[in-house]
Structure formats: C-alpha cells, structure tokens
Amino acid sequence: MTPDFKATHSSFHPGSDSMAREAEQSQVAQSEADEQMIGLVLKASHFAAQKHKDQRRKGKDAAPYINHPIDLAQLLWHTAQVRDPIVIAAALLHDTVEDTDTTFDDIEREFGSNVKAVVAEVTDDKSLPKTVRKQKQIDHAPHLSDRARLVKLADKISNLKDILREPPAGWSVQRQYGYFQWAKAVVDPIRGCNSPLESLFDEVYQQGVEHLGFHEHQT
Ligand code: ZN
C-alpha cells in the first residue's frame, strides 16, 4: 500500500486508521500478556524443580516428585483449558510450602500475593495429625476460591492416577480404596467449577473402584 493510497483511503474511512492502530495495540498487549504468562510459569517450574529436587513420589517406581506438580499444570492447561497464569503457577508450586523449606513469604516475594493466596488455600497445616488434616480438607473444600478448587481437583486426579499406575509400597488394597473415597469426599463439595476435570476425576475414580475390586454400595 502506497502512502498516497493510504491517505486517500483514510479520508473515505475516517475511523479505519485508529481501528487498525487499536487492533495493533491489542495484539501487542496480548503478546506481552502471553510473554508474562510464559515467564511466570517457567519461573514457577524452575522454583518447584529446585525445591523438590531430592524428593520422590511414594509409588514403587519412585518417580521424581516434580512430575506431580507438572502433571497438575498439564491437566489444568489441556483438560480444563485453564488460561489463568495464577492457577497454573499455583499448581506448579502447590506442594512447595507443605513439603519443602519454602515459606509463604518466599512465594509472595517471588510470585506475588495472588499466587501465594492460592498456594495457601491448598496447603495443609503439617503440625496437625494426619487424620485431622484429612478431615480439614473435606470441611474446608466448600470454602475454597475458584482458583483453589481447580488446583485441588487436579491434585486429587493426579494422586489417584499415580495410585492406579503404581501404588505406594506397602499400601493394601483397602488403604488404596480408602484414599479414593477420601479424595471423592474432598472433590464432591467443589463440583461445578470445571466439568472436563470433574468428568476425568469420575473416570479415574471409577477405574480405581473396578481395578481395586470394590463395589460401591448405594444406601
Ligand atoms: Zn499435590
């Protein structure tokens, strides 16, 4: 397009230049937002990888722990279609305070108060006995924010899939089934936040019930 033509063209369509400029500006804003999102997610992956570097999952194959938070991020992006960088970053970091020397202040300093708030919502108080912590997760579930619900749901799916794939050493079938039932008790009150994730949870839960040879009793 020659400058002459452009000038003539604009005079016939007075709004076209400013519309083009706006479209260009919104494209720039979008690519800046995309860059920020990738930056935040990469930083969270790197941070979590450092913190969990010496930890392994409980399964017999002792997979590197970092596989688990990455699994959550993957489920949230691909299955749940979540595009909120706060949720993806919080998913990557969700076990750092509970299971490593990371503090909430560290998370806030590195990733901001929104990410910290979600991580805090899904972090158990390790000073409490395990049975109390597990009951608290059920009681607290209906009060979780939308972002925390997504992370919680993905976390439970990931844990059930891991148990199905490679149960922790020494876990009886009864114990595995108990874990499945508890996960369902946590997930049931938060339904309505993301149907693809909820369907996947139900699918994995059902596979577990069949695989573990238990029959659900309807009362
Ligand atoms: Zn987890």
Image: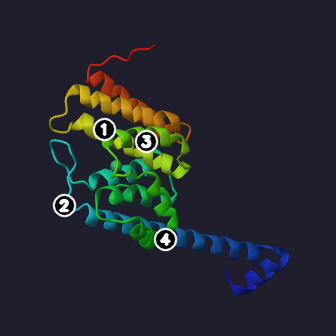
41 sits to left or right of 101: right
- Residue beneath label 4, please? 36
| Residue type for callout 4 | Gln
Q: What is the tally of numbered marks visible in this picture? A: 4
User: Which marked residue is nearer to the observer: mark 4 or mark 3?
Assistant: 3
Q: Give the vertical position of 20 relative to 77 (above or below).
A: below
Report the mark closest to the observer, 2 or 4. Answer: 2
Q: Earlier in the sequence, mark 2 or mark 4?
A: 4
In primary-sequence order, the first of circles 1 and 3 is 3
Q: Which dot marks residue 54?
A: 2
Give residue 201's position: percent from left, percent from top. Answer: 41, 35
Toward the viewer: 143 or 70? Answer: 143
Q: CA distance from mark 1 to mark 3?
A: 23 Å
**Which residue is denoted by mark 1 in the rendering?**
161
What residue appears at the point 25 percent right and 25 percent down from the top-left corner? 174
**On the image, numbered disc 3 is attached to which residue?**
136
Q: Residue at x 21, y 56 (%)?
A: 55
Of 161 and 97, nearer the camera is 97
Q: How is the image coloured?
A: rainbow
**What type is the residue that disc 2 sits on?**
Asp
